[in-house]
Structures are given as C-alpha cells and as structure tokens.
Amino acid sequence: MKKILAAVFVTAFFISSCGGGGSKPAAPTGLTVTIGDNGGELVISWTASEGATSYNIYWDETAGVTKAAAVGVTKAAGTKIENVTSPYTHTGLTNGTRYYYVATAVNSNGESDASTEANGLPQINPTGVLDTTDLAPNGYIRYATNQGFGNAVEIDSAGHIVIAGALWMDPNQYMALWRYNADGTLDATFGGGDGLVTAIGTAGGHVDEGADVTIDSSGKIVVAGHSRDGAGKDKMVTWRFLGDGTADTSFDSDGYVIYDRGVGGNNEGKGVAIDSSGRIVVAGFSDNATDNDMAVWRYTDAGALDTSFGGSGVVFHNNAAGGNASDVGWDVAINSAGGIAVVGVSDNTTNGDLVIWRFTDAGAPDTSFGGDGIALFDRGNGEHGEDIVFDSQGRPLVTGSSTAGTVSSLIVLRYTSSGDLDTTFSDDGLVVYQSGYLDVGRGIREDSRQRPVVTGASGLAAFNSDMIVLRLTDNGSYDTTFGTNGIVLFDYGAQDGGNALAFDATGRIVIAGSTELPDVYMMFWRYK
C-alpha cells in the first residue's frame, strides 16, 4: 500500500512540474507600437507565440513596464488589458503623451514572461483647420512690435515654439529669435523677459539675420545665418544660446562663431543641423572671388571648425550643373547613418538646376548617391531647392520651385537612397502645384503618419500671394482628408508666405513666415 501511494505522489509531482503535461508559451516577439488613424490611438502589434491561445497587454506612461509587481522591482505593474489579439488598437489616449507597452502570451498552462518594451506617441490627425481653441482667437500670431519675418521654426521639449528670423529696428536689421508658449503668448522666461533675443553688429555692421534654427539634445538653441561687416560684406555666423536665451559662452567663448573665407566676398549660412555626435553642420555659400561655392561647415560642440571634416572643417563645391557659375546650398539634413545631404541650386549655362549634394561623415562626396554624390533635377526651366528632410525610410524629400518666364510652380521631389527619383512617388518622383502665378515650396517635413507636408507661397495675382500648406500621401497623391483636396490657403495681407514648419507633440502643424500689409511682419500659424 505504501509503494502504491508513493508512486501516485511521484506521478502527481512530475505532472505538476511539467505544467499539467504542457508548458506556457514563450514571450511574444517583435512588439511594435505605431500611431493610429485617429487622434488618441496607438496600434500595438507582435509576432504570435507558438501554443498561445490569447494575449495580454500591460501599459503605463512611464518606461519599465512590468506584467506584475515582483521581488526587487519597485515599479508597479502596468495596467492590464486581457484577452487581446494582434494588432490591437488602444484608444482614449492623450495626444502628445508617450505610452509604454509589453505583451504576454497565455495558454492553459499559464502566462509567458513579458516581451521587450515598445512605446508610442498618439497624435491628432490634422484636417487643416486653424487651431482657434488653443491658439485663440485666430489660430495665428502676428508679431507687430517691429517689422520682420520668420525663417525657421522648431518646437522644444517643453512645447515652446522657437522661431528664428530678422527684425527691422530702423536703421538696422537684427537677427531675431522668438520663443512662444503653446498658447501663443511670448515666453517671459526667455531673453530679457519679453520672449525675444536679438543680435546686431556680430560682424561689425548693421545687418544680421537668422536663416535656420535647431535645438540640441540639451536644449541649447543653434541659429545659422549671416552678419554684415563694416565693408558691406556678409559673413557666415553660427550663434548658440542657452535655454533661457542667454549667449552660450561655452561656444567659442562668446556664443557665436564667424566664418570669412578671406577673399572679400559674401558668406552665408542657410541651413543648420546637429549630428548624432553633437556637432553642428551648416550649409550655405561662400564667395570664391569669382562666384559662389556651395559650402558645408562642421563645428565641434565647443565652436571650433572640425578638421576631421574635409581636412579643414569646411567643404566647398562648384559647377554641379556644368555652368561654371554660382552654387548655393539652401538647407541641410543628416540621415541615420551620418550622411549629410544639402539641397540648393547650381547655375547652368541658361538658368539653375536643383541639386542635392551628399557627403560622408568625413566630408567626401558620397559616391553611393548618384555615382558622384550629386543628384541634379532639370525640367528645362529654372529649378531651385529650398528645403530637404530624410523621411522615415531614409529617402530625401525636397521642395522648391520651377520657374518658366513669369510663372513658377511649387515642386516636391522624393529620391531613393541611391539618388534616383523615386518612381513610387507620383509615378516619376515629382509633384507639381501650379496656381498660374508664382508658387514656391520653402519648408518640408514628414509627419508621424509618413506623409509629406509642405509650406510656402501660392500666387493669387502678380503681386499677391497666400500662405500655402500642402499634404501628400506616401505615394505622392494629394491627401484629400486635409484642407480642400490636400491644400490649405491662408490670406491675411497682400503677400503671405510660410518659410518653415514643425510638428508639436500633439501632431499640430506650426508654420513660420511673414505677412505684408504693406509692411512686413513675422507670422506663425498652427493647424489641427
């Protein structure tokens, strides 16, 4: 009798140890979180686990989600959503708040360990309506204290709207840097308590201008532009400011660096970006005593030219289009591999061609792009590139204009990573918008749903233009869910135009530019 009981006990112990004849499933793999079609939605997906009959999701607004409180784990378990399948759409979330997720697999033998963690940021899906609720009462702000214009815009980590450009304070033109709160009020903690920082006479003259702005990982604000010297020549300037708007004296001891090629010509910075090592990359042009070279400068965090870039910290290029005339870089972008792309224009024998130059991290032409590091676009008119960004797949997106006689078209181009026009985008890589007058694209970005968004100006008559916002789908068609057939026009003054755009954390579109009444004033708009 004792032997029989012992055998039963051993058998029961073995079955219990093996999970009742089976085992719980492995943790799900490949967890991803993507933005939903609507505001307040995230879509959680994963790869199925063999033997699983259902899945659980755990989420929190803080990283480090666990499926249950455990010994040695101080963080509480995430909120549990039971019995779900992949993909699962999590609704009712707060736009602009980041959410973190893990998933587990379940069967009759138990629940798996948690998957690796993934996170996402729900955002609204803008329809092209001015945000008159949070940017009351109009959905736009005009800075009317002095004449001026906004050339560039960024959103900082606290949600402030940072705009760089210029202000006219007779008889001088100042570099101007504004910072606004999300509700459209000037940030009294920035600058001299009025939300504004200005610079004049950086190079000794009376004309300074900020052409582009970016914000580094520590919240420092970098502005690229130019300053005129006492002889009337422009010198390239890069300014850096602390988060409160004061000059960052750790940057070349006084918060700015000046570049002069030394041949008595003009040098200007047009675009600026910061690479993954914190180095500042500026694109623009530099006079070579005969005409202009496209120029790319790279500075260390301390404000010194980085001699590991091209041997001297600056790289020039001339004659991209074969006209042996001026080449100008208008903007710069850096891809995930550290490749530097500059868009601009090169004069050929009759007009200009749009050019993308791409360089390696060392400053050499990237021969994997176009064979020689250059992609030219020529419709036989005058083509001009003004802004560039890499999309989520590493493809260059470009906007600018194509001019024939007295009429110009706004153009959007997408290239493959090897420098060819992407034929999956509008069949030939090119989208053209034409009102019949003067149209130009000046700013382009890709939104969180992988759609190109462009701003610029659209002509209504010979001396009248509207600010334009245009949204395309990933395949290059007009996004008819936005505005009127993918287009929003804004008419305030005689001439309105957007120069740059950014997206805030909730997904709203912020555009910086100007309006002419007939005096010219800085404007910014926000669309939801």
Image: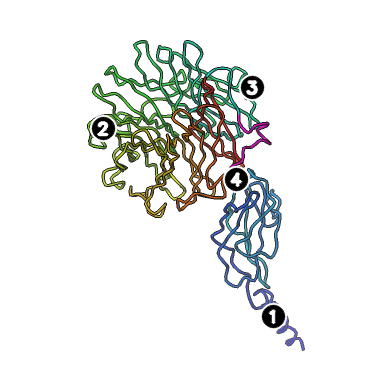
Secondary structure, mark 2, is: loop
Q: Quadrant of the C terminus?
A: top right
Instruction: Give left or right: position of 252 versus 404.
Output: right
Q: Is residue 127 magenta?
A: yes
**Three-letter amino acid code of the residue under disc 3:** Ala
Gap in Å between the C-alphas at discs 4 and 3?
32 Å
In percent of width and height, residue 420 lies at 33, 49
The part of the chain drawn in magenta is 125-140
Q: Main secondary structure of the magenta part?
A: loop
Q: Which mark is residue 127?
A: 4
The answer to whether residue 241 is left or right of residue 281 is right
Dot label at residue 318: 2
Residue 126 image position (x, y, % from top left): 59, 45
Label 1 sits on residue:
10
In depth, the one of 466 and 524 nearer the eye is 466
Report if residue 277 is visible in the image. no
Task: Give the secondary structure at mark 3.
Answer: loop
Question: Which residue corresponds to mark 3?
Answer: 188
Q: Secondary structure at mark 1?
A: helix
Q: Earlier in the sequence, mark 2 or mark 3?
A: 3
Q: Are there few (<14), some (14-19), or many (20+) residues within 10 Å of tag 1?
A: few
Instruction: Kindly identify the amino acid type of the residue bearing the numbered disc 1.
Output: Val
